[in-house]
Image (spheres, rainbow, N blue to C red):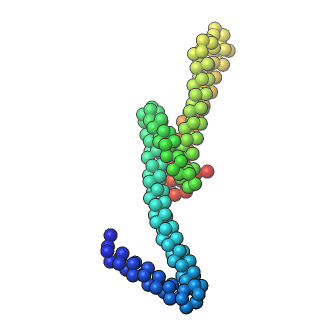
Amino acid sequence: MDPSLNHNSDEHLQKQTKTADNSHHESGGARFNDERSDYGVSQQRQGNTMSDSMNNDKRRSLTTYNHITYFLYVISYFTAGLLWIVPIVMNYAKRRDADGTWLATHFDWQIKTFWYSIVLFVIGIMIITFALGGFGISMLADSDHIAIGSLLLAAFGSLIMVFTFVWHLYRIVRGWIALTDGRPVP
């Protein structure tokens, strides 16, 4: 830190104090109170500037953090979903740090996307498993009508899984674009 800055600010403070003391003696303290309140306002502004820079650092950090989690979601498609758990844990770990900011919408967006995708994917798997007799109920029987129904049900389960895959990717891309633009997601 530059010592001349400290010296200049000390001189400024001493001048304000002397001016306030002189004013206090001349006008019975009325001007002193005005100057003191002006000084308090300037100190408050300086504190807000420091607070804003801390908020900017925090915002920048959380934005980078969200970029990483979106990236991990995209990479999870190439790891057969094995990395799905990493960004969700990261989102829950930092979610409270973003409370009250537009970045909180990104944490919530990613968490909801994860859980809705899991639920829809499990529903699709259960329908396919049921249709193909995985629960001990053989839908593929001797009758052609039952076999066609089982295959249609399995196709419906597959359709749900494909829809989930596309929907999940859409939400990740939409959220990442909004984050890059510096705006919240709905």
Q: Is residue 125 above or below residue 143?
A: below
Residue 106 horizontal/vertical position (percent): 54, 49
Residue at 50% across / 85% down in the picture? Answer: 21
Q: Is residue 119 above or below residue 102?
A: above
**Viewer-proximal residue among 2 and 67:** 2
Left or right of residue 36, residue 61 in this image? left
Residue 35 horizontal/vertical position (percent): 54, 82
Residue 48 horizontal/vertical position (percent): 51, 67
Is any part of residue 48 visible from this angle? Answer: yes
Residue 43 horizontal/vertical position (percent): 50, 72
Q: Is residue 163 above or below residue 142?
A: below
Is any part of residue 74 visible from this angle? Answer: no
Residue farthest along the top direction in this orientation: 142
Q: Quadrant of the N terminus?
A: bottom left
Residue at 57% across / 45% down in the picture? Answer: 108
Q: Quadrant of residue 7?
A: bottom left
Q: Quadrant of residue 112?
A: top right
Q: Is residue 184 above or below residue 165?
A: below
Residue farthest along the right direction in this orientation: 145
**Viewer-proximal residue among 156 and 103:** 103
Residue at 53% across / 51% down in the picture? Answer: 98
